[in-house]
Image (spheres, helix red, strand yellow):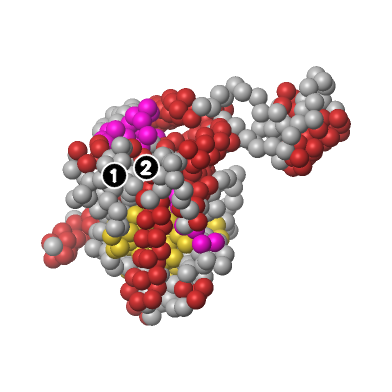
C-alpha cells in the first residue's frame, strides 16, 4: 500500500500537483479553503508527509496562534507579524476515537507535547494550552456527524457547574501540512493531572493502594479489561445471561499496574456492584458508601438531558480516590457528539424516553455493549429518585432554565459563525443537505441545524419536567439571583439591591422573603434566618 502511495506521489509531483502526499492523511473534499482572519485560535500541524497512525504516535510540529478572546487571529503571519503564539513545539501525534474515527473522514487526533522529537528520545512535557491548565495529554476532536459542531462543548457547559471535574475545550481551526481541515475542538482529556483529576499514584499496600484509579465502561477493543460479575438487565430488571459489561483500565495503564493494584481495583468494583445489586426498596443497603450518589445523579442528568445514545455503556469514565480522602466511585462526562437527537438509531432521536432503560432496544439490535445494571438499580431506590428530582429542579432554575440554555446554544453558535469559521468548515467538508451517519435530521444550513437542536432541547426539557415533577413557573422563595439555590450569594445580591436599587440581576418576587410586598432590609434578615435555620419566619 505504501508503495502505491509513493508511486502516486511521484506521478503527482511530476505533474505539479501540490500536497500530493496528503492523500493518506484524509484531507477534506475542498483543499483550497483559506483563513484570512478568524476569532478562533489557529492550529498548525506539520507532519511533513508522514502517515499518521491510529495507534503508534509520530513526531509532528505544532503552532497555535491565539491573540486573546475577542481578538482576531490571522493565518498570514508575514502580513500580520507579532501575533501571540500560544504554543509552538513538537508533539507526539496519532489518531484517536472509535466511531468518530472509523465512521468519519474528518479524523480526531490525540497529541502530547514533547521536549524534542521522538526520534531523539523526546519525552512528553506539560504545557498550558489556550488557558487550560498545564498537562501533557490533549485531544483535537473533529465534529463531523455533529453538524452543529457544538454538542460536546454544550454538554460540558451544562455539567461543569455541578460535577467535580468536566473537561475544558476550545473551538479552533486546523491546518495540517498547509491544508485547511476545518473546525476542531481542542480539549482536555479525562486523565490524571493537577488541573484535571488530581489523583495520587496508587501504592501497593495500606491506604496508598486504594487510590487513585481511572476506569472506563467500554468495548474491549483489544484492551485488557475487567468483566463485571453482574450481567446487564432489561428495563424490568431481567438479566441478559449472555451479555457482559467490561471495564478498561485508564490510569494507571494495565501494563504499569502491580498485581496488588489490579486485584484491589477489581475487588472494589465487585464490592460496589454486589452491594448495589443486593439493594431492595424494602430492605437496607449501604451502596452509598461505594458510589457518590450526587455525582451519579449529575452524570445521569447530563446523559438523560442529551438522550445520549452511547450513554452509560461507552466512554463511561469513572474514578476513585484513596479511601482516606473519599472511598466512593465518581463519574466523569465524555463523548456527547451523538447526543441531543443526533442519532437515527437505537431511538437516540427521541425526546420521550429514558436512555438508561434502552437495553431492550440495544439487545434487539444485536449490540453487545449494553448499559450496566447500575442505573436500573439506582432508579428503583425512592431516596435516589427523590434526590434526582430535587437536583433536576436545581438545574432547571439555573443553567438549564429555558432562556439560559437557549442563550448557551446561541453563544456557541455565535462563536462559530461570527467570523465565518462554520462557513469555512463546510466549504472544506460540504455536507449540508446530505445524510451523514447517524444524523436523524438532515439540515440544509447551519442556521437550520441550530434551530432544530434548540427545538429538540425544548421538547426534551418539557418531557423531563413532566416526568420529574418540575413546574418551571413555580416560585423559589429566596432564590434572589435565580441560580437554583438559596445561599449566601442570594444574600449578597439582595443587599446590593437594597443599597443600589438596581434590579437588573435579581428576581424581585423571590426577594420578597417576608411577603410584605416590599423588598428591603427586613427581607435580608428573613433570608439570613432561613439559611441559618432552614425555615422562614
Residue 185 point in image, percent of width and height: 43, 49
Residue 315 point in image, percent of width and height: 36, 52
In the image, 21 versus 480, the foreground residue is 480
**Magenta highlight: main SS:** loop
Residue that mark 1 sits on: 233
Q: What residue is drawn where x is 44% and y is 45%?
A: 283
Magenta region includes residue 353: yes
Mark 2 packing: few (<14 Cα in 10 Å), some, or many (20+)? Answer: some
Q: Is residue 132 above or below residue 430?
A: below
Can you name the residue that lies furthest to the top here?
A: 517
Residue 425 point in image, percent of width and height: 38, 41
Quadrant housing residue 395 = top right
In the image, 47 versus 55, the foreground residue is 55
- 274 displayed left or right of 69: left
**Count of numbered circles on the image:** 2
Q: Is residue 376 above or below residue 396?
A: below
Kindly report the distance in space between the C-alpha atoms of the residues bearing marks 1 and 2: 8 Å
Residue that mark 2 sits on: 376
Q: What residue is drawn where x is 47% and y is 62%?
A: 320
Mark 1 packing: few (<14 Cα in 10 Å), some, or many (20+)? Answer: many
Q: What residue is drawn where x is 36% and y is 60%?
A: 270
Amino acid at each position: 500500500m505504501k508503495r502505491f502511495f509513493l508511486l502516486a506521489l511521484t506521478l503527482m509531483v511530476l505533474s505539479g500537483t501540490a500536497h500530493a502526499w496528503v492523500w493518506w492523511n484524509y484531507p477534506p473534499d475542498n483543499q483550497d479553503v483559506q483563513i484570512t482572519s478568524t476569532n478562533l485560535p489557529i492550529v498548525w500541524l506539520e507532519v511533513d508527509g508522514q502517515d499518521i497512525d491510529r495507534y503508534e504516535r509520530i513526531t509532528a510540529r505544532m503552532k497555535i496562534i491565539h491573540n486573546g478572546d475577542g481578538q482576531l487571529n490571522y493565518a498570514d503571519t508575514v502580513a500580520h507579524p507579532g501575533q501571540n503564539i500560544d504554543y509552538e513545539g513538537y508533539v507526539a501525534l496519532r489518531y484517536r476515537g472509535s466511531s468518530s474515527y472509523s465512521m468519519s473522514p474528518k479524523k480526531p487526533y490525540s497529541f502530547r507535547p514533547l521536549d524534542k522529537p521522538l526520534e531523539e528520545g523526546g519525552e512528553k512535557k506539560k504545557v498550558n494550552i489556550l488557558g487550560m491548565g498545564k498537562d501533557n495529554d490533549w485531544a483535537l476532536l473533529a465534529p463531523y456527524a455533529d453538524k452543529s459542531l457544538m454538542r460536546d462543548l454544550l454538554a460540558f457547559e451544562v455539567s461543569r457547574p455541578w460535577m467535580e471535574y468536566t473537561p475544558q475545550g476550545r473551538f479552533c481551526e486546523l491546518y495540517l501540512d498547509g491544508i485547511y481541515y476545518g473546525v476542531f475542538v481542542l480539549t482536555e482529556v479525562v486523565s490524571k493531572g493537577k488541573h484535571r483529576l488530581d489523583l495520587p499514584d496508587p501504592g501497593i499496600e495500606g491506604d496508598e493502594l486504594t487510590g487513585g484509579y481511572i476506569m472506563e465502561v467500554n468495548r474491549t477493543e483489544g484492551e485488557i479489561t475487567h468483566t463485571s460479575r453482574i450481567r446487564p438487565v432489561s428495563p424490568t430488571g431481567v438479566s441478559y445471561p449472555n451479555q457482559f459489561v467490561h471495564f478498561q483500565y485508564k490510569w494507571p495503564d494495565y501494563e504499569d499496574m502491580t498485581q496488588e493494584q489490579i486485584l484491589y481495583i477489581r475487588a472494589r468494583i465487585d464490592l460496589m456492584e454486589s452491594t448495589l445489586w443486593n439493594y431492595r426498596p424494602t430492605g437496607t443497603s449501604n451502596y452509598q458508601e461505594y458510589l457518590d450518589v450526587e455525582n451519579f445523579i449529575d452524570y445521569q442528568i447530563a446523559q438523560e438531558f442529551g438522550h445520549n445514545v452511547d450513554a452509560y455503556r461507552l466512554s463511561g469514565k469513572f474514578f476513585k480516590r484513596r479511601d482516606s480522602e473519599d472511598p466512593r466511585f465518581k463519574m466523569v462526562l465524555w463523548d456527547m457528539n451523538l447526543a441531543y437527537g443526533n442519532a437515527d438509531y437505537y431511538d437516540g432521536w427521541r425526546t420521550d424516553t429514558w436512555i438508561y432503560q434502552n437495553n431492550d432496544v440495544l439487545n434487539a439490535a444485536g449490540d453487545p455493549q449494553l448499559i450496566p445494571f447500575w442505573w436500573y438499580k439506582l432508579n428503583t431506590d425512592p431516596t435516589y429518585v427523590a434526590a434526582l428530582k430535587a437536583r433536576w429542579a436545581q438545574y432547571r432554575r439555573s443553567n438549564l432554565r429555558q432562556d439560559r440554555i437557549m442563550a448557551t446554544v446561541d453563544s456557541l453558535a455565535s462563536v462559530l459563525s461570527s467570523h465565518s469559521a462554520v462557513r469555512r468548515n463546510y466549504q472544506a467538508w460540504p455536507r449540508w443537505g446530505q445524510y451523514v451517519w447517524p444524523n436523524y435530521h438532515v439540515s440544509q444550513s447551519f442556521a437550520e441545524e441550530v434551530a432544530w437542536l434548540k427545538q429538540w432541547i425544548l421538547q426534551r426539557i418539557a418531557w423531563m419536567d413532566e416526568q420529574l415533577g418540575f413546574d418551571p413557573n413555580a416560585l423559589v422563595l429566596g432564590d434572589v439571583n435565580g441560580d437554583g439555590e438559596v445561599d449566601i450569594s442570594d444574600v449578597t445580591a439582595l443587599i446590593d439591591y437594597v443599597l443600589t436599587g438596581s434590579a437588573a440581576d435579581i428576581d424581585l418576587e423571590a426577594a420578597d422573603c417576608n411577603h410584605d410586598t416590599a423588598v428591603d432590609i427586613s427581607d435580608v434578615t428573613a433570608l439570613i434566618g432561613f439559611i441559618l435555620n432552614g425555615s422562614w419566619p
